[in-house]
Image (cartoon, rainbow, N blue to C red):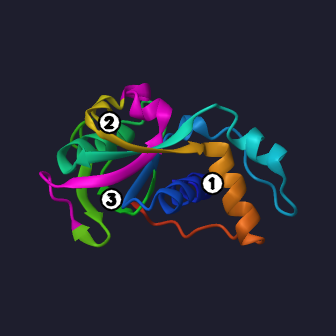
Amino acid sequence: ESTLGSFCADAMRERAGSEVALTNAGGLRADLPQGDLDRGHVLDAFPFINTSVTLALSGGDLRAAIEQGLSLNAGMVQVSGIEAHYDLERPVGARLVDLKIAGQTLDLSRKYRVTTNSFLAEGGDGYATLKNGERISDDGLISDVLADKIQKAGTVTPPPLGRLIPVS
């Protein structure tokens, strides 16, 4: 879990008005420096031409996506709107111990509004279950989503961590 990953996921979730946001650690390429920020800093951190995509995704597919992120095959998944307890001592595919969305236990059959980047929505980094989601909206380039959030906020503080909680 990283502050930049959490910041990005928060910005995507807020822009889309979704319940959950996911992004991949591999999409984070540089930290944002302290002090004044400009679009160049954002592009250094997020150089890919990925868009922010919102899906209607079943709880079962969301759970599978979080499990994929806990496999660490492509780094730890970055999240917003989620509290996930995990155990890396358990086998891949069974590491997620508990998952809550907005403080409520995940309902496997319910559809959730999940925002992610277009790379993951197309199954990139092994997130095949995200392809099962019904595309609701495309909210623009991720770099634009972040630049807009920074510009509107004026001053950015790192978001709190504790979304991904190891149990051992």
Mark 3 touching mark 1, by CB under 8 A?
no
- Of all residues, the one furthest to the left in this rendering is 109
Residue 58 in the image: above or below residue 151? above
User: In terms of secondary structure, where does tag 2 sit?
Assistant: helix
Image position, residue 143 (x, y; %): 67, 44
Q: Is residue 73 left or right of residue 42?
A: left
Which comes sooner in the sequence, label 1 or label 2?
1
Amino acid at pointer 2 = Leu
Crowd tier of the residue under label 2, counting other residues whose Cα lies within 10 Å: few below 14, some 14–19, many 20 or above: many
- Of all residues, the one furthest to the front in this rendering is 137
Question: Which label lies toward us, 1 or 2?
Answer: 2
Mark 2 touching mark 3, by CB under 8 A?
no
Amino acid at pointer 1 = Leu
Which comes sooner in the sequence, label 2 or label 3?
3
Q: For the point 47% across and 58% down, which residue is it?
A: 13
Q: For the point 45% across and 66% down, which residue is it?
A: 162
Which comes sooner in the sequence, label 3 or label 1?
1
Q: Is residue 9 magenta?
A: no
Q: Which residue is mark 1?
A: 4
Amino acid at pointer 3 = Ala
